[in-house]
Structure formats: structure tokens, C-alpha cells
Amino acid sequence: MLGCERHLVRLVPYQPAWAELFRQEAERLRAALGGQVVRIEHVGSTSIPGVDAKPILDIVVAVRDMADVTASEKALRSLGYIHKFENDRPGRLYFVKRLPDDRTTHHLNITQLGTECWFTHVAFRDYLREHPEAREEYRKVKLDLVEGYAADRAAYQESKGAFIERILSLARQERALSDGP
């Protein structure tokens, strides 16, 4: 049910079971990270009903203090997570989980509430969940792109960039309006 070959793009129709798989993984992450966890969210296309997705769970965890996460890396390794230092960004640590056959099953972002990493993941998901027309447009964008970039995940990701930025801009506008003057 989960797992995609590295560097490849394989999309499958949305599967309601992904929500339960996330719930189970969130419990394991809470146990591993303990009191450091503030929130855990299922993000990415597997969290958006109706959107075709690579069968990889994207998870963002907000922690109290990023410095304390380093001490928890051993616990994350025991769950199968590998720290991908080359993908870390300021304010974000990045981990992947893979099957023995090397297919990726999970992407894990660890950050703090209020960071750009937190906002982009959660706001993008929420906007698409709340706007059916944008959700359908994203589904079509992904299906069109996979035809040309099935063997090049980096190019596929890059090609989605303009759409993602447009949705994040709309999400920021909505947030500004709801915050009021």
C-alpha cells in the first residue's frame, strides 16, 4: 500500500487507508519523540481526498525545541527513519523511511510551529481540502506532469512549483483576511 521507488514518480488514486496508516505512524512518532511533540500533521497528497499521490506518507512534526531533536535521532532510527542531512533547511530536519527493497514510504519533516516549513505544508493541504476546484486542478497538473517526468522525481517536483506557490499565495491571502485588521 505504501512505497515508491527512489527518483521515480508513480501516482495512485487516493486511498482512505492512508489516514489510518498516518494515525498509526503518528502514535509511533509521539512515543519516540515524547514530550518534545507539540503537533503532528499528515500533509502532502496522501492527506488530500481525491488527489492522486505517490504512495508516500508526508508528515510534519512540530517540536518544542529543535535542539532536542538531535538527541532523539536514535529513537527515530529505531522506527526506520534515516536523517537526510543534505535535505535539511534552516528550521527543518528531514528524514525518510524506506522498505528493505529501498522504496520510500515516509517523508518526515521536523520543525517548530510558526515556521515557514510548518505553514507551507499545512496551509497547502488545508487550502486544497477546502477548495474543490483547486484540488481538481492540482490532480490534473500531477497527472499531466507524471507523463513527462515519471523517471525524474526532481523535475516533476520542480514543475509543480508554480502551482504550489500560487496556492500558498492564496492561502496567505485567506489567512490575512481571517486575521482581520
Image (tube, grey):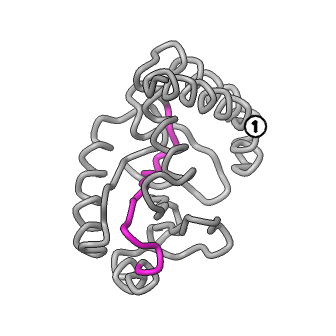
The residue indicated by pointer 1 is: 159
How many numbered tags mark residues here?
1
Percent x, y of residue 105: 45, 58
Name the residue at 62% across, 68% down: 88
User: Which residue is outermost to the front?
Assistant: 181
In the shown orientation, is residue 33 left or right of residue 57? left
Residue 5 in the image: above or below residue 144:
below
In the shown orientation, is residue 170 left or right of residue 154? left
Which segment did they paint magenta?
52-68
Q: Amino acid at mark 1?
A: Ser
The one nearer the camera, 112 or 154, is 112
In the shown orientation, is residue 146 left or right of residue 43? right
Name the residue at 39% across, 60% down: 62
Percent x, y of residue 59: 42, 54
Name the residue at 50% across, 66% down: 96
Residue 151 in the image: above or below residue 15:
below
Residue 91 in the image: above or below residue 117:
below
Residue 57 sits inside the magenta stretch: yes
The one nearer the camera, 64 or 28, is 64
Residue 86 in the image: above or below residue 2:
below
Residue 89 position by quadrant: bottom right
Q: Residues within 10 Å of mark 1 (few under 14, many from 20)?
A: some
In the shown orientation, is residue 98 left or right of residue 22? right
Q: Element at badge 1?
A: helix
Residue 77 sits inside the magenta stretch: no
Percent x, y of residue 144: 69, 26
The one nearer the camera, 113 or 77, is 113
Percent x, y of residue 179: 44, 28
Name the residue at 69% across, 49% down: 153
